[in-house]
Amino acid sequence: MIPFFSARRFQYEKPQPIVWLEWSANLPLIGLFVLSFFPMTFAQLGQPLMLVAGIAQLVRMTRWKPWKTLSEPLVWSLHFAYLCLPASLILRGVLDNPFANHNLIHLFAIGALGGLILAMIARVTMGHTGRAIYEGPKMGFAFAIIILAAVIRGAGVALFPQYMMTFINVSAGLWVLAFGLFTMKFSMMLMKPRVDGHPG
């Protein structure tokens, strides 16, 4: 999805998957899921698998040429959100600190999941209400602050645990603001008929 949207918007050839890289990026994630049911084994093998998966995911992402997308928030937001996945995996793979390791899950949960959801619902709202996808309300600020929320909740709490509750509250506030901006700018589009007259 991300390399397809990027290549289509900026008119460059979409990189084709490399089989060994795809396996290296995704197979360790399956292994981490299976090992999550076996805590003692996870404690031994979890971090090496995270490191392998994170590096592979990062290499995979650089092949999508994210630097070409910085002029379009609806595209760079996808890359920055996805970057939270390898960043979380690599940091959890190298930090031998259970507290930090646990909190860095939020870098993935808020940044990758929340960020991708926000970017995609903005994009899909434009397309599925019959509007030109890249001519909608400006959402760059909202995309940026949800990534900031992920960094504060994940890395911030991991590095500065003494400020945990402050960082959690700030991160939650940024999350609410980001999705609040989406609601304010896009909700009316979803409550009216398509502007192109098509059903849906």
Image: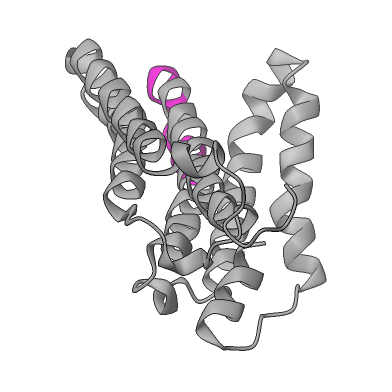
In percent of the image, x 52 and y 65: which residue is there?
Answer: 133
Which residue is found at the position 45% from the left and 28% from the top? Answer: 106
Give the vertical position of 196 relative to 182 (above or below): below
* Above or below: residue 152 compared with residue 160: below
Q: Position of residue 51 (x, y in %)?
A: 57, 46
Is 26 situated above or below 164? below
| Residue 91 among those drawn in magenta | yes
Q: Which of these two is toward me, 166 or 104?
A: 166
Q: Residue furthest front?
A: 197
Question: Which image quadrant for residue 161?
Answer: top left
Magenta segment: 90-101
Q: Which color mode does the image show? A: one colour
- Secondary structure character of the magenta stretch overall: helix
Q: Residue at x 72, y 47 (%)?
A: 200
Residue 166 in view here: yes
Left or right of 128 on screen, residue 112: left
Q: In the displayed structure, does residue 34 sit left or right of residue 109?
A: right
Please check the rendered image and state whether residue 21 is part of the magenta-colored stretch, yes or no: no
Residue at the extreme bottom of the image, as rendered: 12
| Whether residue 144 is situated above or below residue 1 in the rendered picture | above
Q: Residue at x 75, y 29 (%)?
A: 33
